[in-house]
Image (tube, rainbow, N blue to C red):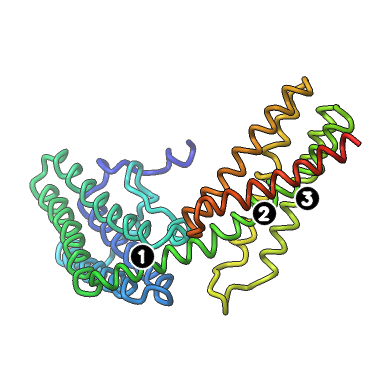
Amino acid sequence: MRFSLHRKRFNDLNEQEVLALAISSEEDDARIYRGYAAHLRTDFPDSALVFEGMAEEEDNHRQRLIDLHRVRFGDTIPLIRREHVAGFYSRRPIWLVENLGIEKIRAEAEAMERDAQNFYLKAASRTQDATTRKLLGDLAAAEAGHQRTAVELEAKHLTDDIRESEEAQAKRQFILTWVQPGLAGLMDGSVSTLAPIFATAFATQDTWTTFLVGLAASVGAGISMGFTEAASDDGELSGRGSPVKRGFASGIMTTVGGLGHALPYLIADFWTATVTAIIVVFIELWAIAWIQNKYMDTPFMRATLQVVLGGALVFAAGVLIGSG
């Protein structure tokens, strides 16, 4: 809150400050587009060309705004940026967007231009000064021009075949980086913890002890799977992507898989907790089969047989050991 008190309201900016704000915003957007292009260049070179073209358009508009500022106000441009103005549109950091996939990056770029255009149109509608109104209208028109340019660049560089190829590559990368490690973790966490959790449950019939064993097994397995996945392949030759991302996906899903049937033992009544845990186990196993079918193209019946049969055997082993 204290930070916002030191920010100017947009309505309090004079025409020179509005122009300076537009110049700095165009410069920032050009850098964002070049960042997207650099991120995409290796796997999606044609889309990288689109963002490079959009960056050049931003540079062109920035230069036109600078020329206008020089004519109206001189060579000295006030230092004012988006973060200095309360209520002005903001941009998400590039590292939050670039990991979301190519379609999300395209959507973010469209939103960037649309937000800027809408903001300038609303600002123009609130001013009574003819010169300021014309300036803001020109800025809105420039942002609309950016959107048209983006469409033209996509039409030039992204044919239907290229777009389909990039979408297939993006899907493959998503599966290799997130789905495969996450699925392996979910399977390991769900199945490998069945025996110790249910063995403890039937051996002690103490729900709190069973929960602690399940928690320890789940967290321990998650840490182990995460580090193993991250250390097993740096992704450079295999193309499986960042080892850190894969490690997090595997470790987190391993922990989630184990905790799913450990958490019911927070229920004090032993049989209520056990029945609930068994229901959760079947949900987990069916979820694994569904993921295998959807993302790994494994026939659903085969995935079901493999997962459910394997899980049932481990579950039975845990019960028999705990009851012995």
Q: Residue furthest top?
A: 269
The numbered dot on residue 254 is none
Say which quarter of the image contains residue 59: bottom left
- The residue at the point 32 percent across, 71 percent down is 47
Pick whichever of labels 3 and 1 is earlier in the sequence: 1
Q: Are marks 2 and 3 in contact (CB under 8 Å)?
A: no
- The residue at the point 34 percent across, 66 percent down is 33
Q: Residue furthest right?
A: 324
Q: Which residue is mark 2?
A: 251
The numbered dot on residue 220 is 3
Few, some or many residues within 10 Å of mark 2 (<14, 14–19, 20+): many
Q: CA distance from mark 2 to mark 3?
A: 9 Å
- Measuring from the top left, give residue 130's x and y in whole percent: 8, 46
Amino acid under label 3? Answer: Gly
Amino acid under label 2? Answer: Gly
Q: CA distance from mark 3 to mark 1?
A: 37 Å
